[in-house]
Image: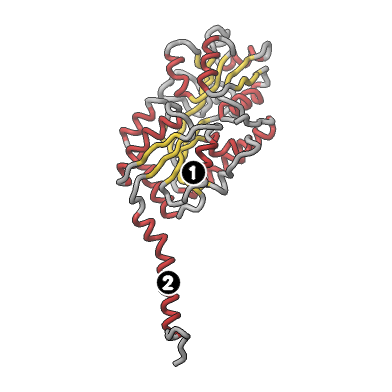
């Protein structure tokens, strides 16, 4: 029998190569079977205390309990969450570094930010959305309008200045939708974050503000701002008396903020599916769900990572047109 210089037969060499190939093929499955075997880092691109951080810290303990490892929330704020999101995009795609982000950094920035350092479609692996909350339009009590119809009528006579948390984000786009649908003199006033915008809305320096409902809840309950409408198809359970924009005659003014979990591009699908199943279970846990809903945030998931990918494309098609038509550019 012919042999190679090392004395191994061709048949033996073939068997060895075949064994190596089979072993290599089995390795990803074996890794997924053992996943997770160490703590998972959930990166939040915003400072502590905001909506993203609150959702992450409510979900992380239950997710860790389901997976059997600790899930550590790590804040990496800056540049409208692009710093934290890019960090995750460049991480090892093994499922141990993920991000909880919202619609702005995970999608809108791609269309509004001229030099975004990552492509959410190419550099990130989608898992699922986990929660959502509508935007709330609230005005200073001195503005002579009790509902959206009256505010729109007033905007035909004078400028209505509405604050947002910055250019290119979801609140800004909600204002652009309102401007386009109402045909009124709606003026967008961007701030560096929701906090300064809320201060000026309460102080009467702007007519009002549009931002995530949970951020405005206390100011509304205290009577410091007057709620006009939630930008959704259904009313919020924490503000059931506040009508929706659809009820109020502006059916296209729909803007809800969703929060999603994504990881680096290249994550094996079985790890994505394992995380997906655990996240769906975590956000629908009665205790977690109750805590979210008390803040005006509701569970919101897709049936699979592939369904989330399709959802991202649908949202991208919807918002990219508005961003282009309105000439929106992020300052982040």
* Residue position marked by numbered label 2 in the rendering: 20
Q: Position of residue 66 (x, y in %)?
A: 31, 44
> Element at badge 1?
helix
Query: Residue 38's mark?
Result: none
Q: Residue furthest toward the bottom?
A: 1
Picture quadrant of residue 312 = top right
Q: Residues within 10 Å of mark 2 (few under 14, many from 20)?
A: few
- Image point (34%, 55%), residue name: 34
Against 124, is 26 above or below? below
Against 85, is 19 above or below? below
Q: Position of residue 3 (x, y in %)?
A: 46, 88
Decide which of 62, 18 is in the foreground and name it.
18
* Residue position marked by numbered label 1 in the rendering: 88
State the quadrant of the N terminus: bottom left
Against 248, is 113 above or below? below
Decide which of 9, 212 is in the foreground and name it.
9
Q: Residue furthest toward the front?
A: 5
Q: Position of residue 122 (x, y in %)?
A: 57, 49
- Image point (50%, 13%), residue name: 226
Residue 149 seen in this snapshot = yes
* 1 or 2: tag closer to the N-terminus: 2
Against 4, is 176 above or below? above
Picture quadrant of residue 317 = top right
Picture quadrant of residue 52 = top left
Q: Position of residue 196 (x, y in %)?
A: 53, 18
Query: Circles 1 and 2: CB distance less than 8 Å?
Result: no
Residue 283 seen in this snapshot = no
């Amino acid at each position: 029998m012919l042999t190679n210089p090392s004395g191994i037969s061709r048949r033996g060499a073939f068997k060895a190569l075949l064994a190596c190939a089979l072993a290599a093929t089995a390795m990803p499955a074996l890794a997924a079977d053992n996943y997770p075997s160490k703590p998972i880092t959930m990166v939040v691109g915003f400072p502590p205390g905001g909506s993203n951080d609150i959702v992450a810290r409510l979900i992380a303990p239950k997710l860790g309990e389901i997976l059997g490892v600790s899930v550590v929330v790590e804040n990496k704020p800056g540049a409208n969450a692009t710093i934290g999101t890019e960090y995750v995009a460049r991480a090892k795609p093994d499922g141990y570094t993920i991000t909880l982000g919202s619609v702005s950094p995970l999608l809108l920035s791609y269309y509004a930010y001229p030099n975004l350092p990552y492509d959410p479609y190419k550099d990130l692996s989608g898992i699922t959305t986990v929660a959502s909350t509508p935007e709330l339009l609230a005005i200073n009590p001195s503005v002579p309008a009790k509902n959206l119809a009256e505010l729109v009528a007033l905007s035909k006579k004078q400028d209505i200045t509405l604050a947002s948390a910055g250019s290119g984000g979801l609140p800004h786009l909600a204002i652009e939708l309102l401007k386009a649908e109402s045909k009124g003199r709606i003026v967008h006033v961007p701030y560096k974050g929701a906090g300064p915008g809320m201060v000026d809305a309460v102080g009467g320096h702007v007519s009002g503000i549009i931002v995530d409902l949970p951020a405005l809840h206390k100011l509304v309950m205290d009577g410091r701002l007057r709620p006009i409408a939630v930008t959704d198809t259904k009313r919020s359970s924490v503000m059931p008396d506040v009508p929706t924009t659809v009820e109020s005659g502006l059916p296209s003014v729909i803007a809800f903020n969703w929060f999603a979990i994504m990881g680096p591009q290249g994550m094996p699908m079985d790890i994505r599916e394992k995380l997906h199943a655990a996240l769906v279970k975590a956000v629908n846990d009665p205790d977690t769900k109750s805590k979210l809903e008390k803040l005006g945030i509701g569970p919101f998931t897709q049936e699979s990572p592939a369904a989330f990918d399709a959802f991202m494309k649908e949202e991208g098609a919807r918002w990219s047109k508005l961003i282009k038509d309105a000439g929106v550019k992020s300052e982040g």
